[in-house]
Image (cartoon, rainbow, N blue to C red):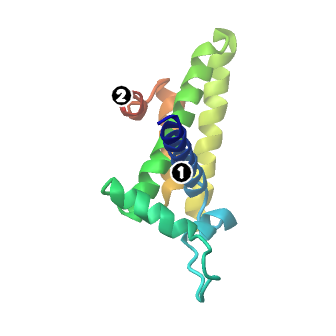
Amino acid sequence: MEKDKTRSNRKRTITTRRRKWIGHTSSKSNTNVTRQAIDWNPQGHRKRGRSHWRRDLHLIFRKFGKTWGEAKKLAVDEVVQGQLLALEAVLKGCDHRLKENLRKELADKTKQWIAVRQHHGIPRDIVDTYAERTLEVITKGKTTHAREFLDS
């Protein structure tokens, strides 16, 4: 009985860590090698008895009624929401004498970063969505998206 609980806890921990890693990696730019590795589909066969990491993930996602794409998007949202909450907390805890200068500088740099990506014709992806949400936290001091994260 105790072994079953331990085994169940280990499986849950592994699943959670995989989901967080997928979210962390998927929130990176499309040109990032680790981001490309998630969707990489090598041809050929593995030795008999070798596990298939991606196949295991697909089985876990199917159990929860999610496709690979939906699961990646949810994992990214989870990571982004956590980071936005951290940014919000830092801005709230910042000394009021520095807060306005910090907000202005962060907003300018984020807008400049978005403009450079647009100027170079880089296609919009999840990174741009994250930048827009970050800009929302910087300018308004809070985000509405993080409320959904806290409620889940």
Please state if 125 lies on the left or on the right of 148 as rendered. right
Q: Which residue is mark 2?
A: 151
| Rendered location of residue 80, percent (x, y) | 52, 42
Residue reaching furthest left? 65
Please state if 89 lies on the left or on the right of 66 as rendered. right
Q: Quadrant of residue 29?
A: bottom right
**Amino acid marked by disc 2:** Asp
Rendered position, 78 above or below 113 = above
Residue reaching furthest bottom? 44
Residue at 43% across, 31% down: 146
CA gap, disc 1 and disc 2: 19 Å
Q: Reading the chain from its start, which is encountered first: label 1 or label 2?
A: 1
| Rendered location of residue 109, percent (x, y) | 65, 41
**Amino acid marked by disc 1:** Gly
The crowd level at tag 2 (other Cα within 10 Å; few <14, some 14-19, many 20+) is few
Regarding residue 141, the answer to whether it shows in the image is yes
Q: Quadrant of residue 52?
A: bottom right
Question: Which image quarter holds the C terminus?
Answer: top left
Residue reaching furthest top? 96
Disc 2, SS: helix
Q: Which residue is mark 1?
A: 23
Residue at 36% across, 28% down: 151
| Rendered location of residue 26, percent (x, y) | 55, 57
Please state if 136 lies on the left or on the right of 44 as rendered. left
Residue at 46% across, 25% down: 142
Could you say which is closer to the camera, residue 57 or residue 99?
57
The crowd level at tag 1 (other Cα within 10 Å; few <14, some 14-19, many 20+) is many
Disc 1, SS: helix
Regarding residue 123, the answer to whether it shows in the image is no
Q: Quadrant of residue 67?
A: bottom left
Marks 1 and 2 in Cβ contact (< 8 Å): no
Residue at 46% across, 45% down: 77
